[in-house]
């Protein structure tokens, strides 16, 4: 089924045969990359104990719970080694796993695939041709930068790649629509922006912000399009990037060379953004929300009171999950906003814990008494809410243009639960818990776009519209990505993504 929906697991690791690998194969013993190993002994990681195996209530042993200091993500980012004897909110643990500058996933392993030159869709017979070329390109991209593929005899390439993969067990290369359909995807978004800009009252300048710009490809494609097709608008365009990753910010700066006067790159997390910009502007966010940390919530089976998860790390670096009924300020804001909305969970993200019959939940609890009378988990998008707070406070006159994933296949248990995935020797491996060795796993959450729009309207006081990937692009894309049979992979791929615009 090569032409069906490509979930992110495949999109990001498209060359691999099977995204399905059972956990026990990996969970037994893993000897990690010697380059990154902190100890010279073989580390063992047991991921068979999931967050739901045992549930402790903070109130059962407050003294024990408060024994370890509470660390925030910002404190954690300053650490060069993984924390021990400490506790943190689940979302701060996830942030640290992804973004710690020393051992975090983004600092260590992630790279965004970029084809050497744009694919020539019009010369391809159909989508199968495109998939073959993509796979070839991917192989080339997987080789080290210093490996000149053209100098290597073709029959040696696979062998070399295999060696490289073994040497770099965790190297991960993503595929995003921006890169795969460069420059046409960026051009489609540029057409949308120009259309919106023309209907704006104040057209004195076009101000764009892009959060999480990856390789900077979208920035180049939008600015090239404006320069070539809308020179008057181009002359008054300011493109600002807010990028958390130092190495990607550097790349974006290099790639902006052709548009030097138009571009500013700020190496900062959007959550640390402090400048208020009153100007009308567009705020672009593509494939950034899926890595925004969520809080893990479970509800008391009797009272429905939400409990927020903390990860407690003991002296050996082992993790335990402890639940507190004292919600922090972001989780409290989340629940009070959700109460004001006509919120309906979507089956696409599983069965919401509060939709399961209470009697059944209580019965389950009498069997699994170590579940602390708590429901199954729900992952709530607290960082997304924090992002909306930033948007509202710092960019009061923005228009949002965002795209992200609506659902994933191999997520961990729970409502709106993430996929936890890494690569071992070229194979994607998913595990059933987010409490894994920090930095070795990508943690990707789906977005409920209907709810995301409702929350956006609550915080930013304006309407947001959710549109499927294909429907949005149909309006703005040219025919440049059509193959000879008329199939258009830019419209038909990424069916598990959607746009949110305001
Ligand atoms: C999956 S990549 C997507 C890149 C690009 N938008 C694309 O579609 O090709 C996610 C990007 O978001 C950045 N990012 C993640 N969290 C961020 C944050 N809190 N503030 C700014 N950038 C962030 C990452 O460093 C990376 O550049």
Image: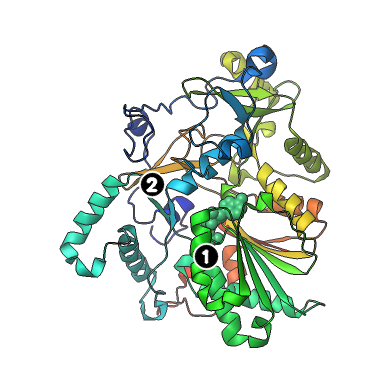
Q: Nearer the viewer, residue 296 or 218?
A: 218
Q: Which residue is mark 2?
A: 19
- Identify the image quadrant of the C terminus: bottom right
Instruction: Indicate which disc residue 252 carries.
Output: 1
Picture residue at 41% right of the left edge, 43% below the top: 422
Horizontal side of 316 relative to 370 (left or right) equals left
Examine the image and state in which quarter residue 54 appears.
top right
Whether ligand 1 has any atom under 8 Å from the Cβ at mark 1 is answered as no
Horizontal side of 167 relative to 495 (left or right) equals left
Classify 446 as above or below 417.
Answer: below
Picture residue at 33% right of the left edge, 68% below the top: 133
Task: Assign a secondary structure to mark 1.
Answer: helix
Task: Assign a secondary structure to mark 2.
Answer: loop
Picture residue at 42% right of the left edge, 48% below the top: 109
Instruction: Indicate which disc residue 114 carries.
Output: none
Classify 67 as above or below 163.
Answer: above
Picture residue at 71% right of the left edge, 46% below the top: 386
State the image coordinates of residue 97 (x, y, percent, origin top left): 52, 39
Q: Mark 2 or 1, which is nearer the eye? A: 1
Colouring: rainbow
Classify 114 as above or below 357.
Answer: below
Examine the image and state in which quarter residue 360 appears.
top right
């Amino acid at each position: 089924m090569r032409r069906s929906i490509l979930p992110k697991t495949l999109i990001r690791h498209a060359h691999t045969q099977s995204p399905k690998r059972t956990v026990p194969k990996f969970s037994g013993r893993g000897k990690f990359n010697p380059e990154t190993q902190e100890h010279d002994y073989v580390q063992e990681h047991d991921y068979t104990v999931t967050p739901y195996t045992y549930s402790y209530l903070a109130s059962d042993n407050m003294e024990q719970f408060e024994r370890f200091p509470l660390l925030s993500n910002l404190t954690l980012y300053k650490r060069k080694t993984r924390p021990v004897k400490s506790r943190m909110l689940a979302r701060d643990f996830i942030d640290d796993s992804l973004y710690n500058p020393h051992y975090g996933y983004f600092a260590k392993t992630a790279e965004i695939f970029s084809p050497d030159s744009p694919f020539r869709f019009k010369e391809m017979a159909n989508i199968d041709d495109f998939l073959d070329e993509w796979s070839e390109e991917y192989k080339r991209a997987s080789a080290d930068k210093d490996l000149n593929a053209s100098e290597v005899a073709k029959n040696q390439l696979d062998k070399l790649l295999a060696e490289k993969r073994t040497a770099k067990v965790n190297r991960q290369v993503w595929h995003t629509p921006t890169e795969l359909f460069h420059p046409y995807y960026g051009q489609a978004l540029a057409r949308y922006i120009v259309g919106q800009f023309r209907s704006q009252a104040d057209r004195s300048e076009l101000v764009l912000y892009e959060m999480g710009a990856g390789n900077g490809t979208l920035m180049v494609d939008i600015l090239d399009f404006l320069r070539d097709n809308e020179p008057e608008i181009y002359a008054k365009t300011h493109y600002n990037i807010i990028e958390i990753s130092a190495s990607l910010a550097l790349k974006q700066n290099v790639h902006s060379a052709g548009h030097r006067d138009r571009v500013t790159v700020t190496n900062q997390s959007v959550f640390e953004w402090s400048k208020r910009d009153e100007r009308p502007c567009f705020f672009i966010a593509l494939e950034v929300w899926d890595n925004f940390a969520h809080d893990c919530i479970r509800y008391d089976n009797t009272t429905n009171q939400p409990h927020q998860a903390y990860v407690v790390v003991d002296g050996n670096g082992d993790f335990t999950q402890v639940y507190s009924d004292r919600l922090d300020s972001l989780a409290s804001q989340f629940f009070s906003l959700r109460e004001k909305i006509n919120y309906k969970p979507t089956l696409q993200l599983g069965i919401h814990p509060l939709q399961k019959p209470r009697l059944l939940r209580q019965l389950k609890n009498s069997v699994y008494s170590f579940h602390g009378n708590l429901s199954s988990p729900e992952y709530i998008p607290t960082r997304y809410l924090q992002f909306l707070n930033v948007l509202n406070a710092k960019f009061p006159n923005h228009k949002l243009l965002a795209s992200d994933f609506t659902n994933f296949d191999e997520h961990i248990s729970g409502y709106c639960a993430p996929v936890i995935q890494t690569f071992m020797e070229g194979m994607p491996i998913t595990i059933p818990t987010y409490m894994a060795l920090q930095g070795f796993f990508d943690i990707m959450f789906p977005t409920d776009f209907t709810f995301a729009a409702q929350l956006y309207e609550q915080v930013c006081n304006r309407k947001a519209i959710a549109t499927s990937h294909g429907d949005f692009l149909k309006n703005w894309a040219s025919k440049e990505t059509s193959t000879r049979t008329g199939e258009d992979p830019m419209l038909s791929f990424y069916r598990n993504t959607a746009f949110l615009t305001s």
